[in-house]
Image: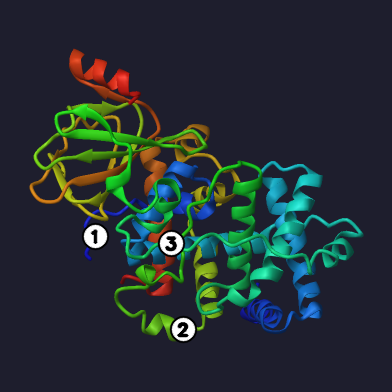
Amino acid sequence: MSIAHHPGDELLLSYASGAANEAVALLVASHATFCAQCRARVQRAEATGGRVLTDMAPVPMSAQAYESLLARLDEPARAVVQAAHLQSDVPAPLQAYIGTDYGALPWRHVGGGISHLPIRTRGGMRARLIRAEPGSGVYTHTHKGEEWTLVLTGSYTDKTGHYAAGDVQSTTPEISHQPTADAGPVCINLAVTDAPLVFRGLLPKLVAKFHGF
Amino acid sequence: MDVGEAARLNALVVAVGRAQDRAAFQALFDHFAPRVKGYLMRLGAGNAVAEDLAQDAMLTLWRKASLFDPAKASASTWMFTIARNLRIDAIRRERRPELDPNEPALLPEAERGADESLDWAQAEDRLHAALAELPREQAEIIHLSFLAEKPHSLIATELGLPLGTVKSRIRLAMARLRQALGDES
């Protein structure tokens, strides 16, 4: 699979360093299941973290720390995380949040072929899935902050280009856009925002408020 | 840290993974536990919490050592990811969506060829040398990304820089590091 639009280095670095909040980490990890290049880039950035740890000024452990740790070495480990379902088209990191079947989700219809589903994450940003029937478009909107969109299935087009499965679009407050789903499979996206979207027009504003965008 | 020291740490983790070698584990504890503790305290943890989490990090090393693959990461890098994840889980109480390197869907499309046979300790050494040679303003932002745990927008505000400048410094720095490794040339 060839990916045309990647997350920026600053996003990969914040994922690797651990500074990214949960919603951003979910987006980066999900993108990486589509993208060998970004997996490699994350590994490079983590190696930078290895250097940071090496250079860290050591803070002595207490005198009994090693002995008390030895007593714990034979404790049974907690159960390991359940393995991902490989036959699912839901990226493994996302399966922990929504399961393995996009069709089985309690989608909330917004109208005009668009539905959405908030995803619970902690750490301050909002993550949601947005599902668009072919040909349907999200109302023109701008952003108070940054928004990242990962295409999970299908594809969409806006004035900046064409985005297919695995692609990440980054938008900033200056950009006003109206993404429209292409003909073909249903377009499902993972959208992460650090502030509410700003819709143009009264009706879209009311609909957005009702749905908590 | 020179290549020899990195290779020594790698070999110690491998020894723990293969044979639950407690002498190797103690040597790893002596090296890593105080650094992990320092890392956690630098990011705001108190002494007691940092000490507990550093112990948990060492316990994780003990349990997962058999999964350690020196072809993919050095012991220091692996230990960093363990400490990072424990911190996100225990202090921020967030989940950490992880890449699963063993998942077939995650295997690289193109074989990594040269990279695979590369001694990763040497590759990381080149990376570290390149890191040391970064222009100061780029190194500062990379460093803050790991030790300030702030969004880049906030780092930009604190440094009095436009966000775009912070992002372009990160991109320049990361491109230099990749260049040092001969990636994506």
Q: Quadrant of residue A192?
A: top left
- Residue drawn at (51%, 83%), measured in percent from left and top? B119
A21 and A55: which one is in front?
A21
Q: Nearer the viewer, mark 3 or mark 1?
A: 3
Amino acid at circle 3: Ala
Q: Residues within 10 Å of mark 1 (few under 14, many from 20)?
A: some
The residue beneath circle 1 is A3
**Quadrant of image for the N terminus of chain A:** bottom left
Check the residue under mark 2 and report the chain it is in. B
Q: CA distance from mark 3 to mark 2?
A: 30 Å
The residue beneath circle 3 is A84
Task: Using the image, determine if residue B127 lies above or below residue A149.
Answer: below
Label 2 SS: loop
- Residue placed furthest toward the right: A63
Label 3 SS: loop
Q: CA distance from mark 1 to mark 2?
A: 26 Å
Q: Which mark is residue B146?
A: none
